[in-house]
Image (cartoon, coloured by chain):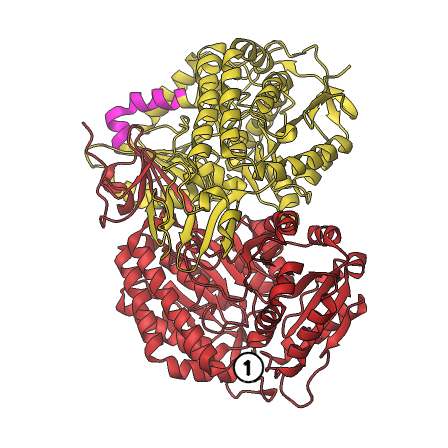
Chain colours: A yellow, B red
Amino acid sequence: MSRPVLLAGQWRPARETGTFHAEDPSTGSPLSDAYPTSHWDDCDAALTASADAAIELRNLPVERIGRFLNSYAARIEESAAAIVDLAHQETALPKTPRLATIEMGRTINQLRQAATAALDGSWSLPTIDTKLNIRSRHGPIGPVVVIGPNNFPLAFNGVAGGDFAAAIAAGNSVIAKAHPSHPGTTRLMAELALPAVREAELPSATVQLIYHMSREDGLRMVGDARVGAAGFTGSRLAGLALKKAADAAGKPIYLEMSSLNPVVALPGALATRGDKIADEFADSCLAATGQFCTKPGLLLIIADDQSDGFLAKLRQRFTDRPSGTLLSTAVARSLGASLKTLAGAGAEVLAGGSPVSGTACRYTNTLLRTSGDGFLADPETLQTEAFGNATLVVVARDLDQARVLLEKLDGQLTGSVYSDTQGSDDQAYATLAPILRRRVGRLLNDKMPTGVAVSPAMNHGGPYPATGHSGFTSVGIPASMRRFSQLECYDNVRPNRLPIVLQDRNPNGQVQRLIDGSWSAADVAPRA
Amino acid sequence: MSRPVLLAGQWRPARETGTFHAEDPSTGSPLSDAYPTSHWDDCDAALTASADAAIELRNLPVERIGRFLNSYAARIEESAAAIVDLAHQETALPKTPRLATIEMGRTINQLRQAATAALDGSWSLPTIDTKLNIRSRHGPIGPVVVIGPNNFPLAFNGVAGGDFAAAIAAGNSVIAKAHPSHPGTTRLMAELALPAVREAELPSATVQLIYHMSREDGLRMVGDARVGAAGFTGSRLAGLALKKAADAAGKPIYLEMSSLNPVVALPGALATRGDKIADEFADSCLAATGQFCTKPGLLLIIADDQSDGFLAKLRQRFTDRPSGTLLSTAVARSLGASLKTLAGAGAEVLAGGSPVSGTACRYTNTLLRTSGDGFLADPETLQTEAFGNATLVVVARDLDQARVLLEKLDGQLTGSVYSDTQGSDDQAYATLAPILRRRVGRLLNDKMPTGVAVSPAMNHGGPYPATGHSGFTSVGIPASMRRFSQLECYDNVRPNRLPIVLQDRNPNGQVQRLIDGSWSAADVAPRA
């Protein structure tokens, strides 16, 4: 018997086309629980129930959404130990500090931030023009399909992570698709979501869960007429297929796909703090066995007297540090394929480059190197993402070549520049930073990109193909909520028919509204 | 000799693949000026120059953008009479009040509002988290291709209208494509744009103009790597082709396509003010010979004792009013084809339905009718847009059928509901309005949709296929500016390297910024 799916408020047997098992990446062996791959009928049932829930949700006070998110956060917190245990089993990510402290804390905090933002209401940019009596806001867009990735079993989980929290806080129902590498972790959280939904008196289909479906049914879902929008975090291949299906149906989809997250270390910075930068770079590349969306997959340095020495330092660190366990056999296989592709395009292996013997999903920490000329000979292939504990250093001949090279880069989530604090790199910064700026969502100075704080100014987004739309972020509340909204205007609509946030009275005394061109938390003055 | 194009700050002969002439719609005869259809080489040159201009623009003070927009508005105002004369010749739209007062006023006002918003800076939602030193804003996205429609030669003109103003105010360079039905009007305005660009000391390629290009080159442009985004207003057929090309390249495109703008007139409203509603509906349908994006193309009423009487009133008005001149032979032809399609799907002609004899581009005011059953038999065909002075009345059997019918509607720009002010329609409103709400960008009460004020709360947008993305509006500043932006985050970036709007000091004392979760116009407090 495979595990039931969560449809329309009930855990019910899937109409399954097959079953699958997660694996324990530390042994490469399948875990015992069987999970269903759903037939389209399950997807169809989820869509209908979600569309009905979306209509009901529009008429409920926002306090219920806040109550749900806070209750869900509290329930996850209470059950944290069991969730962390299973997540560790399914992903091999370390329990401490990674799963238990960092990721669990982030997950709970994110749900609570979303609750606060939903209750506050300012996220929806309420805008009121009193003379014309036109009022608008960002309102819920309808059912949101959330497809989570393999690398954050908690904080980006389809049924509990950032996209989920943003979609719910914006007033939408969610159909979550589990990542097949951690179905159990997803199940444990969904089991807590349902009583939280009931406690908050939300429609029972506000949160639904399907574990897996065929690729074809996934594409069909994101373009279905009942869907409002979709959120996806994962590989470029899967993301682009989903984008095509959603685009063809005119459905917004927010994708967070691959990124190399280039780091540029300028000569003055390497001369004055090369050891520190080598440490930071190795930490950033190897943390979580390199399985962050923001792992620096490309380091750009400019050839000079010290560059060989710096490479030696890096090599030492990559060789000395233990190599972690990867998330799955599939990730290890994909990493091996990427390394082969990169080597085939001329990248030289300075460290690592091979699987670790044994049954665990492991690869040696891998440091690759190519020259600027080598990179420019095949920039497309040399931008192949190697998801895992591997990175490529490109040694440009000079500043001018570094400039040309950055101009070849695809859109990225992040780009970092390390420069001398005494000014010797300022000219180079002025040359390179503007090129990077246009290609990245987040530009960093003197800092590695792997930390992605859940903070209002964060942008976990960037130009295509890092994401599907450079105007949006998947991390950072309230901005991430607006992805799952549509702009709703009310023209001359009678006062009692307006959404509460657009009525004359400021509903909570704190929502910021653009009234006649000025932001304020005031009530609309009564008309004369 | 055809007219030159505006490329990289110079009026230069087009590399042309052919020429075309606008026509005088009141006679159906071609006007004398020849305009070029450009070869890809012109598009390519425009893209390269625009990309260079976009880079320069990023480093210029926003005051120059404000100066350009204000100077351009003043120049258009000075030359208004000549522009209106030519626009009248090319479009047959009445000079007064339409072109000279309403549309010219709107165009100038829109450019000035854009200048004010650019100088203010709040449109970019600057967000600063002081503890983490992460800062973000919406910044310019790069060259914007603006493709204007036939029906607003001034206010939606590619080189002077709403998309143009929004794109420039957000800090972008623009490549405008003229609509081939009014190239002269477009030329006159572009001739004023160039000296305004020079006066404001903007890069000379900030504004460029190409009159026409092959369909294939148009598709190629919106997906070109040098482009940031595109704006299009026009037909669904052209819009969907552009969307497909832009989507495939991962380039944002904002489309304002066809819309039926359904109006629902409930029984209580018809009983108490049927004459007034008949007047308003006929005015709204026939203004500008029905050539508004927001013309009501579908009126839904519910059969009762009075519905035949109301239809008779409408018929009288459609018959009595003079029929105006359409924008072009192409528009007249397309209107004829749409009426044929609608009649073929069972719509009965109550008034009009045929071309007016003579050479002018004219059709008799056309009122069509179908039953709810008739509509439901072929809802797709009966949603064919008839762009021009024609509309379809659907008489539903009862409220329940009206509900079913609204559920069949595609995404729309607007939806209006007229209801009794004494409450007799409240139940019906509660049933129908939520269905309409999900399908429209702007919901109106007791008001026809044709007025689209340039006001912050306006939403000239809506769910697909009315537009390409329901989160955005093409009218209404500042919201329309954010279409042409990307989210830019600065993480630990040194203070002197930050955009001015993200530096600690509030640059003008008035830009609203979200600092540590609170909106304010304050400076960032110095760190301890």
| Residue A176, visible in the rendered structure | no
Position of B189 compared to B20: left or right?
left
Which stretch did the figure color magenta?
A268-283
Report the predominant secondary structure element of the magenta stretch: helix
From the viewer's perspective, tell me whether residue B522 is left or right of residue B232.
left
Q: Amino acid at mark 1?
A: Ala
**Residue B11 % position (x, y):** 40, 75
Residue at the image point whose x is 68% and y is 45% from the top: A225
- In the rendered image, residue A281 lying in the magenta stretch gets the answer yes
Taking depth in this image into account, of B37 and B105 the one nearest to the observer is B105
State the image coordinates of residue B470 (x, y, percent, origin top left): 55, 50
Relative vertical location of residue A103 with respect to residue B88 in this rendering, above or below: above
Is residue B456 in view from this perspective? Answer: yes
Q: Quadrant of the C terminus of chain B?
A: top left
Q: Is residue B67 above or below residue A424?
A: below
Q: Which residue is mark 1?
A: B22
